[in-house]
Image (cartoon, rainbow, N blue to C red):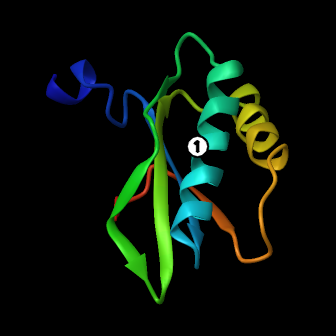
Amino acid sequence: MFRKVLKYPPFCDIIKLEVSDFDEETSRKVATCIYENLLKTNEKDMQIYAPMPSPISKIKNRYRWRIIIKCIIGNNIINKINLSINSIKKTNNTRISVDINTNNMN
């Protein structure tokens, strides 16, 4: 019941978008742009949490920021996430990863 009320799997999907870059400001800006794009295309059943540093905010000299999304995965949601990611300007050093129902939130 606890998982259902808080919208945790299996009652909802959790998507973790992670942005990393050697420059902390770049990783923050890219994560913020993705977040703003997602808000513009927001579904009513999609909870989007603002970008924040990952719990382990730096690994191998790469600064990491993440966005958490709670929703029910479907083609519409996947298309909106892809559009939000592909429409932003990023550097050659910027990496963006998407994990669905990940076991590790670090």
The residue positioned 66% from the left and 42% from the top of the image is 34
With respect to residue 19, does 2 lie above or below? above
**Is 38 positioned to the left or the right of 28 in the image?**
right
**Is 88 positioned to the left or the right of 28 in the image?**
right
Total numbered labels: 1
Extreme residue toward the left, this view = 2
Q: Quadrant of the C terminus?
A: bottom left
Q: Where residue 20 sits in the image (x, y, percent)?
A: 57, 68
Helix, strand or loop for disc 1? helix
Q: Where residue 102 sits in the image (x, y, percent)?
A: 43, 57
Instruction: Name which residue type carries label 1.
Output: Thr
Q: Where residue 2 sits in the image (x, y, percent)?
A: 15, 26
Q: Where residue 10 sits in the image (x, y, percent)?
A: 37, 35
The residue positioned 62% from the left and 15% from the top of the image is 43
Extreme residue toward the top, this view = 44
Report the front residue among 100 and 10: 100
With respect to residue 74, does 44 lie above or below? above
Report the front residue among 28 and 15: 28
Report the residue marked by disc 1.
Answer: 32
The residue positioned 32% from the left and 33% from the top of the image is 8
Extreme residue toward the front, this view = 25
**Label 1: few (<14), some or many (≥20) within 10 Å?**
some
The residue positioned 70% from the left and 31% from the top of the image is 37
Q: Quadrant of the N terminus?
A: top left
